[in-house]
Amino acid sequence: MSLKKRIRIIEMPLDGGKLGDTEQVHDDAYNIFIHPVHPNPRSRMNTVVHEALHAADWDGLSERKVRQLSAYVVEALWRQGYRRTRK
């Protein structure tokens, strides 16, 4: 399955205590910004999934729904042993 949206993940320090943020660059292109320092690997996974959900449904999902969905996805991935393999 091919994605209809282009997503670029950029690691950089973020202001205001944010661990992640997403911006729409064009109708079909998004930048996901991830803070380089997270409390633990699971927190980083949660941030990446959370921001990817924002990009996937830019106008449709509330922040509350994104938090709920990302918690379920991260729990399932974590239980299956998925971890970041490079830094």
Image (tube, rainbow, N blue to C red):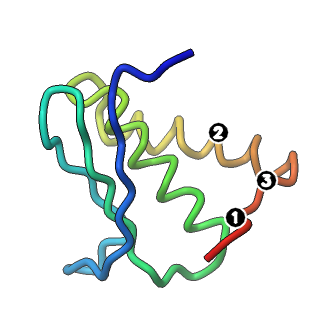
- In which quarter of the view is residue 21 placed? bottom left
Residue displayed at 55% across by 56% down = 46
Question: What residue is disc 3 on?
Answer: 82
Q: Are marks 1 and 2 in contact (CB under 8 Å)?
A: no
Residue displayed at 41% across by 33% down = 65
Find residue 67 and report its horizontal and vertical position in percent.
Answer: 45, 45
- In which quarter of the view is residue 85 placed? bottom right
The local crowd at label 2, few if under 14, some if 14 to 19, many if 20 or more residues have their Cα within 10 Å, is few
Q: Tag on residue 74?
A: none
Residue displayed at 72% across by 47% down = 75
Residue displayed at 31% across by 42% down = 63
Residue 12, compared with residue 1, is above or below; it is below
Element type where label 3 sits in the image:
loop
Label 1 sits on what residue type? Arg
From the image, state whether disc 1 or disc 2 is nearer to you. 1
In the image, 41 versus 24, the foreground residue is 24
Question: What residue is disc 1 on?
Answer: 84
Image quadrant where one finds the N terminus: top right
Find residue 54 and report its horizontal and vertical position in percent.
Answer: 33, 39
Q: CA distance from mark 2 to mark 3?
A: 14 Å
Find residue 45 and report its horizontal and vertical position in percent.
Answer: 59, 59
Q: Tag on residue 72?
A: 2
